[in-house]
Image (tube, coloured by chain):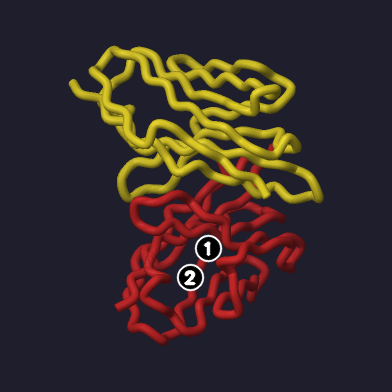
Amino acid sequence: EPEVTQTPSHQVTQMGQEVILRCVPISNHLYFYWYRQILGQKVEFLVSFYNNEISEKSEIFDDQFSVERPDGSNFTLKIRSTKLEDSAMYFCAVKGGTDTQYFGPGTRLTVL
Amino acid sequence: GENVEQHPSTLSVQEGDSAVIKCTYSDSASNYFPWYKQELGKRPQLIIDIRSNVGEKKDQRIAVTLNKTAKHFSLHITETQPEDSAVYFCAATSASGGSYIPTFGRGTSLIVHP
């Protein structure tokens, strides 16, 4: 199973502030994904990233969100101006050898 | 787009009993169906998966069945143990257009009483 780490594990921020969530896959991967899980709800797709560009995004992924691989290793999700409803667990995932997606440990974002 | 329905939302069983979780999907192009187990505060972890060219797959106490015609698939856990207690998510994935984005069900909270 591919290893994926995420930092920070918990981020507390004030409404309107920018946050950057980081994902570091241990081995080389081409496909990256961000998902969101509001407490007690299902996992929701945000965006997929392939070959250093967005390949697909959901309705949730509006102009407040952006992704990039700034140094070819880290994969980041930026929320420009956080809202209360952005409070959730954010999971990074990578695609394995088959169609399976493997999730990182997640970042709990709390917007106050 | 794909729509995945999952039932029940909560399932309570006694240790040693079997548990069955059912999912339906809407997109006939979906061809890969993973099941994830999520313990409280942790990441979803793949426990078993099945492809559309297979009707059943088993791994020790866990099995998954797929009925492509009816567009439903099920997770079966036999001889349940307290450590099986978790939220289980089904998902359906279509590789159409090169996308491998799974659509998740709403989850089933399985509680196994010792």
Q: Amino acid at mark 2?
A: Leu
> Is A97 on the left-hand or right-hand side of B19?
right
SS under mark 2: strand
Q: Which residue is pictured at 43% across the width and 56% down the height?
A: A37
Q: Which of the chains is yellow?
A: B
Q: Residue furthest right?
A: B97
Q: Are marks 2 and 1 in contact (CB under 8 Å)?
A: yes
Q: Which residue is mark 1?
A: A23
Q: Where residue A21 is drawn, which disc sits there?
A: 2
| Quadrant of residue B86 within the rendered picture | top left
Colour red maps to chain = A
Circle 1 — which element?
Answer: strand
Q: Does label 1 lie on the same chain as label 2?
A: yes
B6 over A9 or under it: above or below: above
Q: Quadrant of the C terminus of chain B?
A: top left
Chain ID of residue with mark 1 = A
